[in-house]
Image: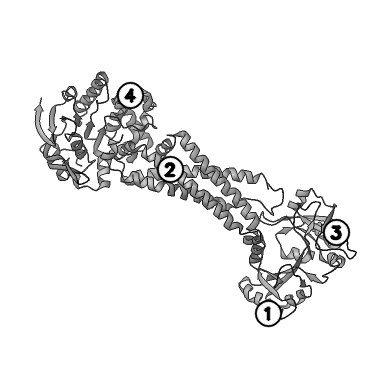
């Protein structure tokens, strides 16, 4: 992917996308003819009720799934046309994922968890350690590097998850309900962190949430329902 | 190597389960090691038999003797380099349980035939000097605590003296060693001339001949020539390679190799199921984590390799520990205290064991690994 967005400043371009799941003989249309553009350095919130297709859309933007129709272009690259292997490599280079349940490896301590994406690079052990230290410092957890997930609070685990997402310095951060499993205070801290990553580090963020308090921190909010885009709120 | 901490950490995820699986594999490979040593002891002679040596025995049965006069005629057959003969004594030393082979032979001939038998020159000379002298292999000498100068009384159920008594006394004048650990050092050899003179019947006969041929590639042709030489005589011969002869001896107590392989086959199949179940559970319970790995950029093949590496490491760990323990046990000595001709863990079997452990790991891991490889990221993440 070109690190720079397209000439019109759009990093993510979703055009005419449809997604249909098959359950037995039944076809479930989760997304229908959806169009969305996300400019570079934007902090976008995707809101909607359960089953509205927001996580599916996030998966399509992050190359975790493929659309049934339409195209997904990120940084000028048609990711829906990449092979599985190329798509995995593309994700490793350009996207950081932040999950609701953190999805940390319980058998690895914080720094080993953060190091995981770097194992896919050609960095030396010392270089990897340096990157891990930097990422943990950004999320304010350098002092908890040796701790295992089970000894960390939910907020701290999510910070480790964020450190893992940013350690390769990706252009795009995709967050699926990042505060959904946290209390208000911890959730606010995570939102502050995401805000700082957007404002100070120039990360483009797409965040799925159904919490209005969380979406209020985004620059723009998109509402999804029944697989279609209904409204946009720009601040 | 950089993935090793991740692989190792996953094995430590369920410590008890991993420990039990490793222990199961360990026990299987310990059994493999011990059976290898026992199999080697019982059938190893086949592998160690000289390719240039033939055995000439009576065509009807091994227990029917051949005329001693055959030796001169055999020596004249083209292609024969040397010959020696042995006669089974089948005696009892103190107790019938104290089995070890005892045979009458001609010292110079038998020592020349088996150059891997190491006998000190002065002991060889003592054997040549005394008609009643005998030499014993180190293993048997140590088993019964014999020393040079001891008199060894052996009662033979087969051979009686001219006066009808069955007790034979031999003076132990030498203890021989093997050049390598595969050389049999359990026999007691005594002089044929003394034995033939003292026995009541079957004088002038020997048990079987051992022939060394000049060119091992001609062994089959020479064997035919020998059998042709004695065709249509009262004592027709059957000549075969030494390996086949030793094998027929070993088969008297069953096909050891087949029995050992059947046991190990059953054990390894069971272990395959145990290890396979462990890996399947391991993959199933971390579907979400595998999904997360794929989300952050691990390719399907990398995930497959990770699960395969875990499985192979698990099996290799158990296998290496089991083989190591069996090696230590075998190093400690023959558990039968000398009944087996030799007791050691062949290096080839050790390497085969390591290979089997790796193959076991690969076989146990392949289906869970394929399952992990085929996981769709979006589906896997939903199962967190």
Q: Would you name the residue on which mark 2 appears?
A: B277
Whether discs 4 and 1 lie on one chain: the answer is: no
First in sequence: mark 3 vs mark 2: 3
Q: Is residue A173 above or below residue B103?
A: above
User: Based on the displayed image, in which of its 4 quarters is residue B55 positioned?
Assistant: bottom right
Marks 4 and 2, how far apart at CA: 38 Å
Name the chain letter of the residue that bears numbered label 1: B
Residue placed most toward the observer, B180 or B161: B161
* Percent position of residue B124, x then y: 80, 59
Marks 3 and 2, how far apart at CA: 62 Å
Q: Would you name the residue on which mark 1 appears?
A: B228
Whether discs 3 and 1 lie on one chain: the answer is: yes
Marks 4 and 1, how far apart at CA: 92 Å
Residue placed most toward the observer, B283 or A171: B283
Q: Would you name the residue on which mark 3 appears?
A: B168
Name the chain letter of the residue that bears numbered label 4: A
Whether discs 1 and 2 lie on one chain: the answer is: yes
Name the disc covering residue A141, or none.
Answer: 4
Q: Is residue A24 left or right of residue B120?
A: left
Whether discs 4 and 2 lie on one chain: the answer is: no
The residue depicted at 71 percent of the width and 63 percent of the height is B114
Residues marked 4 and 2 touching at CB (< 8 Å): no
How busy is the neighbourhood of tag 4: few (under 14 within 10 Å), some, or many (20 plus)? many
First in sequence: mark 1 vs mark 2: 1
């Amino acid at each position: 992917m070109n690190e720079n967005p397209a000439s019109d400043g759009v990093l993510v371009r979703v055009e005419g996308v449809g997604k249909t799941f098959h359950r037995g003989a039944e076809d479930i249309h989760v997304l229908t003819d959806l169009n969305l553009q996300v400019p570079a350095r934007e902090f976008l919130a995707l809101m909607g009720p359960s089953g509205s297709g927001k996580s599916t859309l996030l998966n399509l933007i992050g190359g975790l799934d493929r659309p049934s129709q339409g195209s997904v272009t990120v940084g000028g690259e048609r990711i829906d046309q990449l092979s599985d292997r190329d798509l995995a490599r593309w994700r490793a280079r350009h996207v950081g994922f932040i999950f609701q349940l953190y999805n940390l490896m319980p058998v690895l301590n914080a720094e080993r968890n953060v190091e995981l994406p770097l194992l896919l690079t050609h960095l030396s052990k010392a270089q990897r350690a340096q990157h891990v230290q930097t990422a943990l410092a950004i999320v304010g957890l350098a002092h908890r590097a040796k701790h295992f997930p089970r000894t960390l609070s939910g907020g701290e685990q999510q910070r480790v998850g964020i450190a893992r997402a940013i350690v390769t310095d990706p252009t795009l951060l995709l967050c699926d309900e990042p505060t959904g499993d946290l209390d208000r205070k911890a959730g606010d801290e995570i939102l502050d962190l995401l805000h700082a990553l957007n404002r100070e580090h120039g990360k483009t963020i797409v965040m799925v949430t159904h919490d209005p308090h969380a979406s209020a921190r985004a620059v723009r909010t998109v509402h999804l329902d029944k697989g279609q885009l209904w409204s946009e709120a720009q601040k | 190597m950089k993935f090793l901490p991740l692989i190792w950490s996953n094995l430590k995820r369920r410590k008890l389960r991993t420990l039990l699986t490793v222990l199961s594999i360990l026990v299987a490979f310990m059994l493999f090691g011990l059976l290898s040593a026992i199999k080697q002891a019982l059938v190893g002679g086949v592998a160690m038999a000289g390719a240039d040596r033939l055995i000439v025995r009576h065509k009807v049965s091994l227990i029917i003797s051949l005329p001693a006069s055959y030796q001169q005629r055999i020596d004249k057959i083209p292609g024969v380099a040397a010959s020696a003969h042995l006669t089974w004594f089948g005696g009892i030393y103190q107790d019938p349980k104290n089995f070890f082979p005892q045979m009458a032979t001609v010292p110079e001939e038998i020592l020349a035939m088996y150059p891997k038998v190491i006998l000190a020159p002065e002991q060889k000379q003592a054997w040549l000097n005394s008609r009643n002298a005998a030499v014993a292999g180190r293993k048997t000498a140590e088993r019964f605590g014999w020393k040079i100068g001891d008199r060894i009384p052996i009662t033979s159920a087969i051979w009686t003296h001219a006066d009808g008594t069955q007790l034979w006394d031999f003076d132990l004048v030498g203890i021989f060693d093997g050049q390598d650990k595969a050389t049999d050092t359990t026999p007691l050899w005594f002089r044929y001339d003394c034995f033939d003179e003292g026995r009541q019947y079957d004088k002038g006969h020997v048990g079987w001949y051992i022939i060394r041929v000049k060119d091992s590639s001609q062994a089959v042709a020479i064997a035919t020539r020998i059998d042709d030489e004695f065709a249509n005589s009262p004592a027709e011969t059957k000549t075969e390679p030494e390996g086949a002869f030793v094998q027929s001896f070993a088969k008297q107590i069953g096909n050891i190799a087949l029995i050992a392989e059947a046991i190990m086959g059953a054990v390894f199949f069971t272990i395959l199921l145990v290890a396979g179940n462990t890996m399947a559970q391991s993959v199933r319970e971390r579907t979400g984590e595998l999904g997360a790995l794929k989300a952050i950029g691990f390719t399907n093949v990398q995930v497959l390799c990770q699960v395969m590496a875990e499985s192979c490491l698990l099996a290799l760990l158990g296998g290496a520990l089991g083989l190591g323990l069996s090696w230590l046990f075998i190093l400690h000595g023959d558990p039968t205290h000398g009944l087996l001709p030799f007791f050691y863990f062949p290096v080839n079997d050790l390497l085969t064991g390591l290979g089997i452990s790796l193959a076991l790991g690969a076989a146990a891991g392949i289906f869970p690994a394929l399952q992990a490889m085929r996981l769709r990221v979006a589906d896997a993440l939903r199962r967190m």
